[in-house]
Image: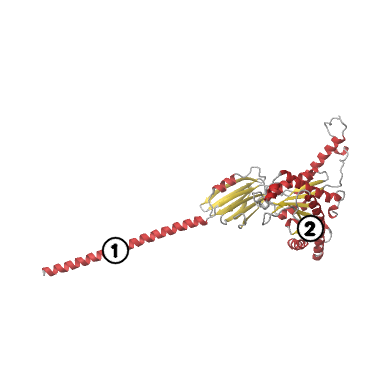
Amino acid sequence: MTTKRTAQQIAQQIAQQTTQRTAQRTTQRIASRRNWLIRCTTAALSIGAVAGQANAANVIAVRVWPAPDYTRVTIETTQALQWSAFPMHEPERLVIDLQGLNIDPVLRESLAKHPPSDPWLSKVRIGQPRADQLRIVFEFNTAMRTQVFALPPTEPYQHRLVMDLYPAQAPDPLTQLIARSDEKERQLDALLEQIDRPQGASTPSVRPPAAARPPPKSTVSRLLTLAIDPGHGGEDPGAIGPGGTMEKDVTLLIARRLHALVEADPNMRSLLTRDDDWFVPLGARVAKARRVQADLFVSIHADAFLTPTARGASVFVLSESGASSAAARWMANKENGADRIGGVALASARPDREVRQLLLDLSTTAQINNSLKVGSSVLDALRQVGRLHKAVVERAEFAVLKAPDIPSILVETAFISNPEEEFRLTDDSYQQALAEAIFRGIRASLAPLWNSPSGRRQI
């Protein structure tokens, strides 16, 4: 019996040990699987965090463009931003909230460096009210109206958030032009007095009142007004030459030289649609010309082509087909078209749609004919400076040429994509030669207007 019980005990003991070992192995497998799941989860979270960081928007650049017309602020990022904007008053502010963007050194440093000469923007503050939200506050010097909008990627930029900050009381280009014209007449008056004064006569310490002075000797019944338009600007560099020269810079330099030549002529005056590096929408360029009742609109450009061999200057006017489509768009977008038509021909009863369309077509036809005369004269003058791309005035549907009531030309001074012409465009003497040629051509074509009060339609 003793031996039998011992065998049973041994069997039980073996069974217990087997059970224990099985339990231990099961526990170890469970623990091992739990650890494996933890490691997998941790890895997945890490991968997700890295992926989230990779997909988060990074700031590429922040650009601030202060200008007399408005200030533009652009934030360029690798991804589209989620944003909201709202104004605040006393003091005047604009608040921009950006989601999922941390305070970036590029953002902070760029906004902190906004030019103190900015006429509209006094201060920029940046903060992070929440972990997932960035706040930018623009403080203004005066009442403003603002536009905030996003732009999809387009060469050479990625995603952009644009803030256009306009003064509520917009500067009037006509007022500015009149002020400069008055100063020009005062300078001319002083010069004529100096010429008429006998030699050795001293300058009177007190000038006689204006009523007692003879009127200045003017050769014209009115000053002819030119709107000079340097192409591109600001965010829009235009064409870029193989050496890195930007069209927007070249056109501004040539336009400034042309402006100086016009201002030196006692019979003419001019308005620059931009006089520094900022962006002006195409419609705003034409609107400025119309606001000052320009006798001629001259847009300055530097062409580019797919191959570097293209070369020479060109002059463009609006094409017949372009004028027709522009008229259709103009009529569709401007329901109060009679206001514009009234300035051209009829100022009485509002004509019906067919008559308005006919008047617009007639106005555009006269604009094209006058533009061709000016363009031909400018092209002849440019021929004396360098090579022409085409020997005749060309026609194309340039948006800035589509004002129906202002003769308009677009001068392609050269091909900036041609290395040789790019080099010449950066030369001061060549820029001056181009400006002088354009001026001679304009002056020759506008001379018949000098004694014509209504000469705009009599070029």
Q: In which quadrant will I find the N terminus? A: bottom left
Viewer-nearest residue: 320 or 436: 436
Amino acid tagged 2: Pro
Real-space Cα separation, disc 1 to disc 2, in angstroms = 92 Å
- For the image shown, how many numbered marks are present on the structure? 2
Amino acid tagged 1: Arg
The residue positioned 79% from the left and 51% from the top of the image is 378
In the shown orientation, is residue 452 left or right of residue 271? right
Name the residue tied to disc 2: 404
Q: Is residue 285 above or below residue 37?
A: above
Viewer-nearest residue: 166 or 35: 35
Circle nearer the N terminus (1, 2) = 1
**Counting other residues with Cα less than 10 Å from the Cα at mark 2, is it few (<14), some (14-19), or many (20 or more)?**
many
Q: Secondary structure at mark 2?
A: loop
Viewer-nearest residue: 145 or 81: 81
Give residue 359's mark.
Answer: none
Name the residue tied to disc 1: 25
**Counting other residues with Cα less than 10 Å from the Cα at mark 1, is it few (<14), some (14-19), or many (20 or more)?**
few
Q: Position of residue 398 (x, y in %)?
A: 73, 57
